[in-house]
Image (spheres, coloured by chain):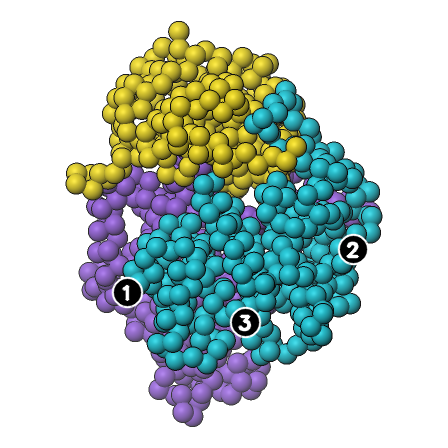
Chain colours: A yellow, B purple, C cyan
Amino acid sequence: MSAISINNLCVWFGVGAERSYAVQDVSFDVADGESFGLVGESGSGKSTILRAIAGLAPTWSGKMSVAGETLGPKRSKSFYSKVQMVFQDPYASLHPRQTVDRVLSEAMNLHGVENIDTRIGRLLDDVGLGPGFRFRYPHQLSGGQRQRVAIARALACDPSILLLDEPTSALDVSVQAEILNLLVDLRREHKLTYVMVSHDLGVVGHLCERIGVMKGGRFEEVLTVDAMRRSEAQSPYTQHLLESSINSIR
Amino acid sequence: MSTSQGLRNWLLSEEPTSRRQARFASWYKGWLTLRSNKLTMFGLYVLAFLLLCAIFAPVLATHDPFAQDLGQRLLKPGENGHLFGTDSLGRDIYSRLLYGARISIYIVLLVVMVAPLVGLIVGTVSGYAGGWIDVLLMRITDIFLAFPRLILALAFVAALGAGIENAVLAISLTAWPPYARIARAETLTIRNSDYIHAIKLQGADPFRIVTKHIWPLCISSLVIRVTLDMAGIILTAAGLGFLGLGAQPPSPEWGAMISEGRKYILDYWWVATIPGIAIFAISLAFNLLGDGLRDVLDPKEDNS
Amino acid sequence: MTDAPLLDLENLWVKFRTRSGVFDAVRGISFTLGKERLGIVGESGSGKSMTGRAVLRLIRPPGFIEADRLDVHGEDILSLPEKRMRQLRGGRVSMIMQDPKFSLNPVMTVGQQLVEALRAHEKVSRSEAHKRALEVLDEVAIRDPKRVFDLYPHEVSGGMGQRIMIAMMLLPNPEILIADEPTSALDVSVQLQVLDIIDKLVRDRGMGLMFISHDLNLVAKFCDRIIIMYAGRIVETCKAGELRNAQHPYTLGLLNSVPDLEHPRDHLEVLKRDPAWREAPSVSARV
């Protein structure tokens, strides 16, 4: 049973003659517990797919089913308790006037979680932040710390699927390493399914098992990370991306 | 000594341990920023002073503000125990000034309670809902914006009779549209932020999002704008008083006092000028405070 | 005089006066730049961008610069009056920044900006400037210079905008080019193209290049010499080819924390920041 099943998804903006397609005819499946990567350059539509799944894209067509539930124009409460998202810019994903405590407790309140006080402590522990961070405001946190809070918020309701929209691209390399390690650990502990968007093949290679390569709103190809490591890409575009990315000196 | 030091450390702590501490710490830091701006503090002191004058007017006044004494007309400031002299009916200007402060503050409070709140609601609903609701509310806003304030006040007075409350009503009805526009502009920007997307993904309904997440962010701009508008509101009220449309005689409203002193301005300048200086002082004080509040409430976010 | 390095910096400090004391963004660094490509690598807060701006004396109050020596081709610029500094900026030392969206003037056409850049430094006629602008657009591999000349910045792609930025900065024939994260905002395939252009131009014109970046691997492949900065100090300097033999734990940590497609690891190495690194004196990178 797939955790996520997307068929012929099209997402567009604008009306009538001014319609422009961000995503065209995309289909893929993500199995339960799998980690699927979406890579491509800017404008390829990868982030738009995530937003469409999350219910943040207004105009789309096709068939999407998540955790057995077919998705309609609006998302249900039960959807939100199974699927959560982590956003790209840590400086924009936390409300500037709310403490960490407020952010997490509101999320839990909305999902009807009990024992909020103890759960907050545990959540902060899970993401590697101590209790001292609980009552800080976002401007008192570094980029990496903010991203950890965003991850904690996403985990507040115990979801089974995480949508990750370039979660480390705005972070320093050393901080990125910490967050990537955290994501690997969390997936193992909570048996999560990941759909991760990134432009960085190294990051995607570290975290994912299969990758969909996107260009101009369409899928160029879907391949396993292993195949990618052996440079066994079918599409010349994927080959080109691989060549541009190999820049390690070790 | 040690308790105040302890309190200061508690407020400046990098790791607050309770919601209350975090909130107080936030306010305290804002206060420190405000305090470092000398002009702003000057404005704040002037306002505090005027507020105290208004509150303690019965204690501070030397004479009854309504007592006329035609034998003591148009005395110079300092003569016969009248600190600022007397007006054309022999009333002590200083005492009238103190009681007039009450009226000015009353007007300001009434307008502040109504106009920004209405503007906030209209603007945020309009900005968040979009579509035809946005169009409808904004056109209504435009209609009210098109009314010149004094003309509307005249119309109200003609319809409902002169008096402070009607003047305030007229001012409020024309003061809320700019706040609606500010609130709407802020909402349009905030609406697309990731933190709003995130709370939507937690299942929050639009009412919660607008009141709990968007309003706190709009309130800073509104507070700044209100403070800066105060001067204008007071001047408008004074203008209405000057025209005889606001507070009615013998009320010691500052604008009305200027109007009464108009005839004597060449030979007895203090009758009109001193209330004028009072209006100038309160307007300037509000402007300076508003400027300083902007630095506290709306600092450029550091994204480095 | 002609033997002097293009840029000679000794004991540079960049400080900011804040409410809670003086904050040191750059703490006593020294290096020289010849006709080579020098990479300055560091994370956010390391002071690398501040260094670039300090060379051009673009630090505004409450920030200020202190240095024992700040020479451009043998000439001291620390005490230069602002008027001469303006001639220097763009004329002898140019800078390209990260995002052309923010560094190109949105209300002027590309051509207007190029012409203005040139005429600010050389007395040339409009037609001569127009010709030179078209020539330099061609040099940065823009295929249809006449068409691009009349476009506005929002009408060109990121990669093209960055190439226009490079063209604009190189028109007045500077000796030194400071590039502050010139490819970070670009897609991967466009990055290489832009880097190739920078490389060719710098080589052909015999310029010195100061390449500021957070990407150690990129700098290692593109530059001749590397400086690694941390907390306002230089912690290590080496030739690009010898990066794999780096000694300092911070450098090694940076190298190891990047996920490598070809060498998968279960967990990435997490950099343990040693407070001693902040306190250790700056390594001199003067040649």
Image point (66%, 32%), residue name = A250
Q: Of the residues under marks 2 and 3, which one precedes in the sequence? A: 3
Rendered position, B15 above or below B149: above
Q: Position of residue A161 (x, y in %)?
A: 46, 18
Identify the residue position indicated by label 3 in the image: C91
Q: Is there one chain holding both mark 3 and mark 1?
A: no
Decide which of C28, B64 is in the foreground and name it: C28
Q: CA distance from mark 1 to mark 2?
A: 69 Å
Q: Give the letter of the chain under mark 3.
A: C
The image quadrant of residue C62 is: bottom right
Rendered position, C33 above or below A138: below
B276 left or right, relative to C35: left
Q: CA distance from mark 3 to mark 1?
A: 56 Å
Q: Which mark is residue C284?
A: 2
The image quadrant of residue C30 is: bottom right
Going by the numbered disc 3, the residue's amino acid type is Gly
Q: Which mark is residue B149?
A: 1
Going by the numbered disc 1, the residue's amino acid type is Arg
Q: Which mark is residue C167?
A: none
